[in-house]
Image (cartoon, rainbow, N blue to C red):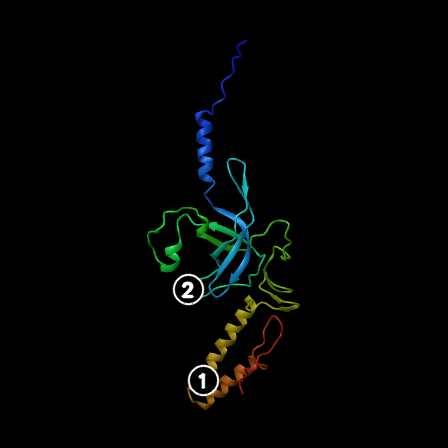
Amino acid sequence: MNVTRAPASQPNLITVIQHVIADALSSVHTAFPAQIDKYDYMTAKADVKPLINAIYPDGSVMEFPIIPNVPVVWPRTSLGSISFPLQRGDGCLIVCSERSIDDWLLLSEQHTPSDPRMFDLNDAIAIPGLYSFASQTKITGNDKFEIHYKDQQVTIDESGNIAIGGTSLQALMTSAYSTALTTYLSALQTLTKAIASLNPTTIAAALLVFNVLYPSGFVVPSNGETSKVKAQ
């Protein structure tokens, strides 16, 4: 008896195109979480360990290797910068440049890359601070600016008051302080002009007025502290 076999199913054009696209995208890297493996503060380079594995169209999974010599991004301008200690295990976000950054890292100027690669792991950049929701934050509220380092913290609230560790400092320049200081400096300027006239009568009159207004010198209106500036 002759048995007719059904022809093996052939992938259609759409399926083939989807596989080709998926295969191409498997080598495109954009952004992913990682952690610091090693950091050199003098060069701002880090070795980083990707925390998400690669998944390929055939279903296979591969753990990414440690990426060496990744430039670390800190808030920075030509005049200043902010940085903090990085150690093994600290979280970061890896962003892969659209084009090769090898030449730019050396030249630091506009150029055409000599390597045509795109979205490659070799062009990774690390931005510290990315952690999962499972990691506990040290932030204490949403109504103030906070800086934390180990067990110490610095906070500035909406009124400008500063707290350092367990010590609170009043706002550096309140509206009342600014007004009082402006008035005081104006009176002091008047006294200075009188002294510059070298007229004893004018100087005596100006000293009398100034000392009536400020018998104890300049008093900070918010906390009553007195400066040592007093006309003698």
Q: Position of residue 49 (x, y in %)?
A: 54, 52
Residue 231, placed above or below residue 221: below
Say what amino acid the circle numbered 2 marks: Ser
Quarter where residue 223 is shown:
bottom right
SS for dot 2: loop
Residue furthest to the right in view is: 166
- Tell me the quarter of the image containing the N terminus: top right
Horizontal side of residue 135 vs 15, given as left or right: right
> In the rendered image, which residue does mark 1 sit on?
194
Q: Position of residue 178 (x, y in %)?
A: 53, 69
Q: Residue at x 46, y 49 (%)?
A: 121
Q: Residues within 10 Å of mark 2 (few under 14, many from 20)?
A: few
Q: Residue at x 48, y 64 (%)?
A: 81
Q: Residue at x 33, y 54 (%)?
A: 111
Q: Residue at x 58, y 76 (%)?
A: 219
Q: Position of residue 160 (x, y in %)?
A: 57, 64
Quarter where residue 169 is shown:
bottom right
Mark 2 or mark 1: which is in front?
A: 2
Front in this rendered view, residue 182 or 104:
104
Say what amino acid the circle numbered 1 marks: Ala
**How far apart are the alpha carbons under marks 2 and 1?**
46 Å
